[in-house]
Image: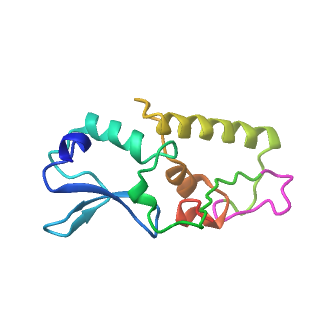
Amino acid sequence: SSAETGLPEGWEVRRSNTKNLPYYFHAQTKDSRWEPPQGTNPDKLKAYMAANHSSKGVAPAAVAGTEGKIRCAHLLVKHRDSRRPASWREPKITRSVEEARTMIENYHKQIQAYEEGKEDPNAKSLSELATTESDCSSARKGGDL
């Protein structure tokens, strides 16, 4: 309901089958968008999304029809001692193992802040971070393997 989600009347949160990400849909107009529509209560929406669309608690309707299937996503950070120290982002990777580990730990903190719905300007979803920071070609799919 719009009282629960904070969305304007007629709007609902759905999950994209292709991107496995939540989006906003208006059933009457068939309008769909990635960003919340105008008139959304951001505090209510944030609480609703944290409770229903994070890895902690995905709404049952969002996973309907996926029985027997498992999805996996990751964020790869290579270092100079990697088997092939190159990626789509960097032709020659020169960072040390320690630098790569520090980067991963920082990404983990950002993802945790996002999952917990914290008011943190650095908070980002795994998908967001993987898209821009992963050294794997799965980055174009938000890290989805």
Q: How many marks?
A: 0
Q: Nearer the viewer, residue 45 or 141?
A: 45
Q: Which residues are magenta?
A: 79-89
Q: Is residue 21 above or below residue 47?
A: below
Whole-percent x, y for residue 75 in the image: 64, 53
**Whether residue 21 can be seen here:** no
What's the residue at 19%, 70% (across, down)? 30
**82 in the magenta segment:** yes
Q: Nearer the viewer, residue 120 or 20?
A: 20
Q: Is residue 69 left or right of residue 21?
A: right
Q: Is residue 136 above or below residue 113?
A: below
| Quadrant into which the C terminus falls | bottom right
**4 in the magenta segment:** no
Whole-percent x, y for residue 122 in the image: 48, 36
Q: Nearer the viewer, residue 122 or 13?
A: 13
What's the residue at 80%, 59% (across, down)? 85
Its colouring scheme is rainbow
Whole-percent x, y for residue 10 in the image: 15, 56
What's the residue at 57%, 54% (across, down)? 130
**Whether residue 40 can be seen here:** yes
Q: Is residue 90 left or right of residue 52?
A: right
What's the residue at 34%, 36% (across, down)? 47
For the stretch drawn in magenta, the main secondary structure is: loop
Q: Is residue 84 above or below residue 48?
A: below
When asked about the image quadrant of residue 28, the answer is bottom left
Q: Quick one: which residue is furthest to the top in this view?
A: 119
